[in-house]
Image: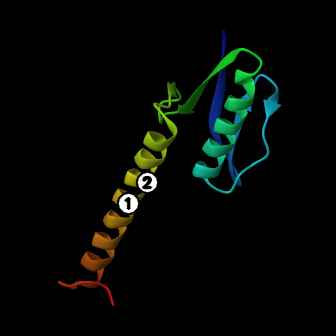
Amino acid sequence: MTQVYCDIIPQASGWCFLSEEGQSPVYPSYRLAVEAARGYSESQTAKRKTTVLRQQDLKGRMLEIDGHDAAIARIGHEANRLLEGAHFSAVQHRGCRGSIE
């Protein structure tokens, strides 16, 4: 089987994926773009092609996505970390010792 790449990339209004056939429509979330890329990947199997999903890291390198669930979990974990940090900063800024009401 031929191996082709499908890259999940950010756009100004969301996320898309790039394949050998061009750019996909823009999706409002990373999760939707990955799901669309996974669907594209499955369609390539019939053409005897193996698709490798990749995403760009903060240094510009393209890294292979381990699997759909792993990619979503990783993004979810990062988003939660950012939200927790924002909550902590808001509490510190207000001088509160408890939760934000």
Residue at which label 1 appears: 80
Q: Residue furthest right?
A: 21
Quarter of the figure with the N terminus: top right
In x, y percent, where is residue 13? 71, 55
In contact (CB < 8 Å): disc 1 and disc 2: yes
Q: Residue at x 82, y 26 (%)?
A: 21
Compared across the picture, whether 5 is left or right of 100 comes to: right
Q: Residues within 10 Å of mark 1 (few under 14, many from 20)?
A: few
Q: Residue furthest bottom?
A: 101
Amino acid type, callout 1:
Asn
Compared across the picture, whether 7 is left or right of 55 comes to: right
In x, y percent, where is residue 89? 30, 70
Q: What secondary structure is marked by label 1? A: helix
Residue at which label 2 appears: 76
Q: Residue at x 22, y 85 (%)?
A: 96
Quarter of the figure with the C terminus: bottom left
